[in-house]
Amino acid sequence: MARIEETFDDRDRYMIECDDPDCEQRFDDGQWYAYEDDLLADAKDDGWQILYADEHPELERDMHYCPAHRLPECVTCTNIMIDSTGWKDGQCPECIKEEIPNERS
């Protein structure tokens, strides 16, 4: 997780950085201290996409993307696709294989 962590008045301070190359977008709680869970929840509410290594075994670390650099999601199953190779009309290869209709308008 790309973050800065320090202690201030016995509270942890965190900052999340976008993992997209050359992006300088950052998210913090505005007061420079927050509990990590609250910070991550706020970041998600603000449009950040947070991928966890335990949910995606191919990742070596947690990855965080700002709203401008979100990874694509399958329009059918809403799974985040790390590698969009093989996509067709916004669907992941698994949904295409299962012949799940794309009802996107």
Image: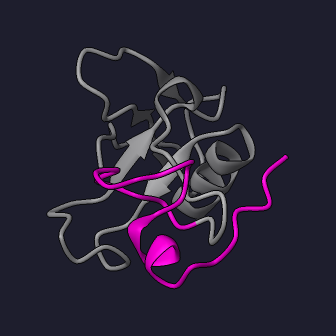
Residue plotted at (74% across, 47% down): 45
Residue 94: image location, x then y, percent: 43, 77
Residue plotted at (50% across, 38% down): 70
Q: Nearer the viewer, residue 59 or 104?
A: 104
Q: Is residue 10 visible to the viewer in this orientation of the structure? A: no
Residue 48 as seen in the image, left or right of residue 8: right
Residue 36: image location, x then y, percent: 52, 57
In the image, residue 99 lies in the stretch drawn in magenta: yes
Question: Total of numbered circles in the picture?
Answer: 0
Q: Nearer the viewer, residue 35 or 101?
A: 101
In the picture as drawn, the residue positioned furthest to the bottom comes out as 98
Quadrant position of residue 52: bottom left
Residue plotted at (28% across, 70% down): 53
50, above or below 2, in the image: below
The magenta segment: 79-105
Residue 13: image location, x then y, percent: 47, 42
Residue 78: image location, x then y, percent: 62, 65
Q: Nearer the viewer, residue 95 or 72?
A: 95
Residue plotted at (57% across, 54% down): 40
In the picture as drawn, the residue positioned furthest to the right comes out as 105
Quadrant position of residue 102: bottom right
